[in-house]
Amino acid sequence: MDKIKNLLKYTEIRTKVTSVFPFFMTLAFLYANGRQIKPLPSGVFFLAMFFFDLTATTINNYAGMKESGQKLPFSQPAALAVTLSLLTFSVALGLYLVILTDLVVLAAGALCFFFGIIYSWGPIPLSHGPYGEIASGFFYGFAIPFILAYVNAPGDLLSYSLTSQKLSLEISVVPMAGLALLAIVPFCLTANIMLANNICDLASDMEAQRYTLVFYLKNHALRLFAFLYYAAYLSVATMVLAGFLSPLSLLLFLTLPPVRKNIQRFLKKQDKQETFPLSVKNFILIISAHILLIFVSGLLPAWGSR
């Protein structure tokens, strides 16, 4: 039992909402738009995504131990073995998904693996510079929806032909635009978790010579924190106006008062223990309501039969 608890602590299992929720948001979007959902590739992708998310977290914690002596729930050899095991399992699942699909998934998956590793590892990890929020927002917000949508309906997004002489790629502009707009909510919410964390850790990061985006933005970091939430709501309104989402999704604005209250609390005080969790609460509140509204819209005859 202690080993399981240590494993859950090492992988920070509670933080996996940032990958699980965008996955189910995309499933709801595909369902609401009448797309067929393929159980096998979707399930394999979920497992590959989930286990690599665990891997990325353990790499981050292992790197923290090597860099600053951060205490781990395992010995160093055991921690490394857990990380390598998770990485091997996620790579194996990723390769199986490629067998089920095509080279687009291989390219997208390889990109995710590469940036997931260098996010915390290497001479200059992404998380130690001003690109951490952008990277985490992009890969959780856009890469997950893109791969899941592609494995279920590849022709809807793009098509390619590959010969020994030429690679041709055709992108379906409208569906890709819809997916890009869909990605804005998880992009903003995930980036804000990272941003809130870095705002709270600014002093300690500077002592450790980690110059994150907050260091460069100075006082504007708090303005960006608030702006990203409002941008998420604006993206939903834009999707409704463009016909990508049902008008039912406008009910998401009912979550704005408690979200705004949490924003104001964080703007007044930035503390890792007291107010940082508000960014996680806002993430769960907004995206869970977003998923529910998209899914329910798919049950409505006027929308779900599109």
Image (spheres, rainbow, N blue to C red):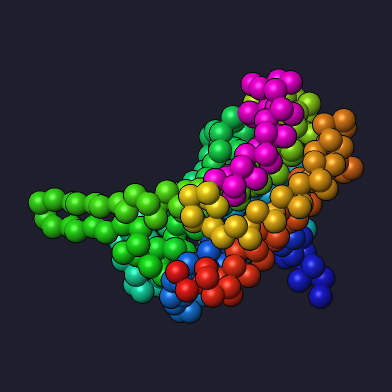
Q: Is residue 289 toward the left or the right of residue 168 in the image? A: right
Single out the residue that lies furthest toward the bottom: 39
Q: Is residue 178 left or right of residue 188?
A: left
Residue at the limit of the structure toward the front, as seen here: 302
Res. 121 image quadrant: top right
Please name the residue shown 83% across and 48% down the image: 258
Determine the image quadrant of residue 23: bottom right
Residue 125 visible, this orientation: no
Residue at left offset 35%, top offset 58%: 157
- The verdict on residue 223 being magenta is yes
Tell me if residue 5 is in the magenta stretch.
no
Q: Quadrant of the N terminus?
A: bottom right
Magenta stretch mostly in which secondary structure?
A: helix
Point out the stretch of residues depicted in magenta: 212-238
Give the residue displayed 10% in from the left and 51% down from the top.
165
> Measured from the top left, where is residue 91 in percent x and y?
46, 64
For the residue pair 81 and 303, the one nearer the viewer reads as 303
Whole-percent x, y for residue 269 in the image: 88, 32
